[in-house]
Amino acid sequence: MNPYDVAIGLNQDTLNSVLNQAFGLSSLSSLFSNTNSVPIEGQQATVEWTVNQAPQISLTQPTSSQWSNAIDSSGGPPAVVPNAGTLTLPSLTLNYTYGGSSGTPTVNPTLIWTWSVADGVLTLTPYGLELTGTGASDALITYLLLPTIMGSAKNYMQVITLPTAQLGSAIGIELGPANFTVSSSQLLMVAAIQGQPIPDIPDASSLPSDNLFVQLSTAAMNAAAQSAAKSQVDGSHPVSGSGFTAEYTGTLDASKSSITLGSNPLDFNLSSTLSISVSATFLDGICSASSAATSL
């Protein structure tokens, strides 16, 4: 079994805590209320939509009822697949007009998403939508309401994107391609130092049960310490990537490890046992939660 040097785990409660915080921020209001228009059969269709309660992510497989009641982007039933979860909008108000019809229903749609891993990157994709009670025509649902809701949900699902190479850069080490899994209990990412084989997913019983955890191997901590020493300890050294900025300062004093989760969607502030402090910001870092890192 190929070992890992870095592991990051988040459970469903942590993910929903971040969504709850994001929902309450005025700076993110456009993610939860907007207007969309599209021509359908020569007539303009418009919907003003408002999310009234924070979306809620579930890492468990959709139920048989959710699968059978869902439609995909073509308007037909989606094929059942194993790597799936759901995102529910507990209260969504739709104010739509199309031709001579209009409506202002408040509904609670459930989106089915799928996950896949390619080249060390975890991708979540909107896959189907369970939407009832709109009173809208099939054409309006297929061509306006469904893509509108699935498009907004794609933004919310970014909350469960985890950094891999960026996190390694932030603590001064190069990580190889990551491996991921999504289970009913947690989202897990593992990675090894560059040059090592892609790590296997460890047995869940060997991992912490915390809502949020980070583990660093001795090799990862030593490599981070060496990198900090080479880069003039106590200096500030920014690194950046797509949608990501990070900065660290370090000392070689021994201390406890800790990690803070915050930001939209994620913001890591990580300290190793060698006091290499990292501040990483994703998409303007705003929301917060916290936990503690442990060594392997």
Image (spheres, rainbow, N blue to C red):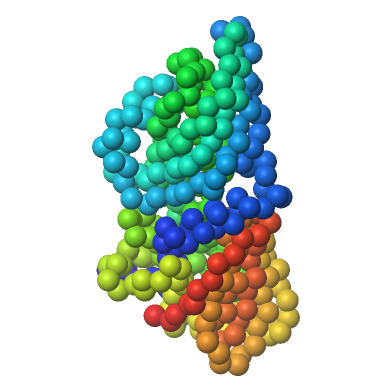
**Residue 195 seen by the camera:** no
| Rendered view: 15 above or below 196 | above
The residue sitting at 33% across, 36% down in the picture is 66
Q: Position of residue 216 (x, y in %)?
A: 46, 77
Name the quadrant of the N terminus. bottom left
**93 left or right, relative to 11:** right
Horizontal relation, residue 144 to residue 27: left or right: left
What is the quadrant of the C terminus in the image? bottom left
The spot of residue 207 in percent (x, y) is 34, 72
* Position in image of residue 133 (x %, y %): 44, 26
Q: Nearer the viewer, residue 1 or 36?
A: 36
The answer to whether 205 is drawn above or below residue 26 in the figure is below
Residue 232 image offset from top left, x and y in percent: 70, 84
Q: Please state which of residues 273 and 140 is positioned toward the viewer in this rendering.
A: 140
Visible residue check, residue 182: yes
Looking at this view, is 114 or 4 the one in front?
114
Quarter occupied by residue 231: bottom right
At 41% from the left and 61% from the top, the residue drawn is 11
